[in-house]
Structure formats: structure tokens, C-alpha cells
Amino acid sequence: MKHIKTEIIIEASSEKIWNVLMDFKNYGKWNPFILKINGVKKEGKRLKVNIQPPNGKKMTFRPVIIKLEKEKVFRWIGRLGVKGVFDGEHYFELISEDENKTRFIHGEKFTGILVATAGKAIEKTKQGFDLMNIALKEKCEEDS
């Protein structure tokens, strides 16, 4: 297993950050890593997600939402092929520090037989998370 975990403090309410995260249609305007998300925002539903890691190829995958708790947690699981080959459980967590300050945690747990061979791809993914976190911070703080 490999685990990427990033976090950033955003000077905005968890409600504001959540609203930006759930506004899938505008991802392309601010998000340098997750370019587009389509799908129904409900546990058990499949999404279509387009990403572009830094210096990497665009990828499209179809994860399933496994947890959606308003203003707190958004998790999905994606798989390459069948379960156990290369699985990624992606998550966003929002922890309210105070009324206008939120800890944004963004990570992914990778499991499966191909994880050991994916070192460079996982590092690029982490870089993409960091870029997205900074862009989310800028987007949420610009109107505060």
C-alpha cells in the first residue's frame, strides 16, 4: 500500500470550501489537477473524472462515491481493471478550525499488485494534489 496525504489551511468556512468542491461544472476554471468531474453526487454512484498530473498524461477514470458527508468528507474509489490490481481510494476531508478557517486534507490510499511499480506516477499525483490544494485555497479566499 502507498498513501498520499496532503493538507492546507484555508481561510474560509467549510461551507464555502464544500460548495467549491461540489461545483463540478466549474473545476476547469480553477483546478489544475482535476480538470472535470461529471456524475450524480450520491454514495454508490459512479463519477467520470478527468485529471492531468503535472508533466503527465491526461487520464479519465470512473470511480464510485463511497462516502459523501456534507461539509466534511468526500471519498471515492477507482480501480484499474479488477479489484486488487491497482485501486485508489481518493478523499477530501474538511475540518473546521473556526468559523472562517478550515483544514483541508486531500489524499489517496493506493492498494493492489501494481502499486509497487507506480512510484513516479504516485509522486506526480502528489504534486497534482498540492497544486489543487493551493488553487482551492486561492479560489476560496479570493472573495473572503
Image: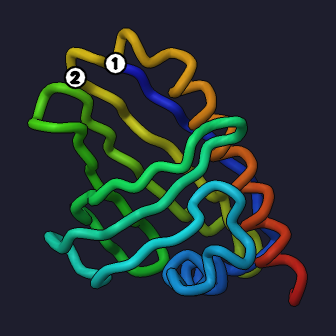
Q: 142 and 59: which one is in front?
A: 59
Task: Give the amino acid type for the residue marked by disc 2 in the picture.
Answer: Gly
Contact check, label 2 and label 1, Cβ < 8 Å: yes
Residue 29, x across and y down, in percent: 72, 78
CA gap, disc 2 and disc 1: 6 Å
Residue 13, x across and y down, in percent: 69, 80
Residue 30, located in which quarter of the rendered image? bottom right
Residue linked to disc 1: 115
Residue linked to disc 2: 112
Q: 7 and 21: which one is in front?
A: 21
Would residue 25 appear left or right of 73 to someone viewing this image? Answer: right
The total of numbered circles placed on residues is: 2
Residue 14, x across and y down, in percent: 61, 77
Residue 117, located in which quarter of the rendered image? top left
At label 2, counting other C-alpha atoms closer than 10 Å, the crowd grade (few under 14, some 14-19, many 20 or more) is some
Task: Give the amino acid type for the residue marked by disc 1 in the picture.
Answer: Val
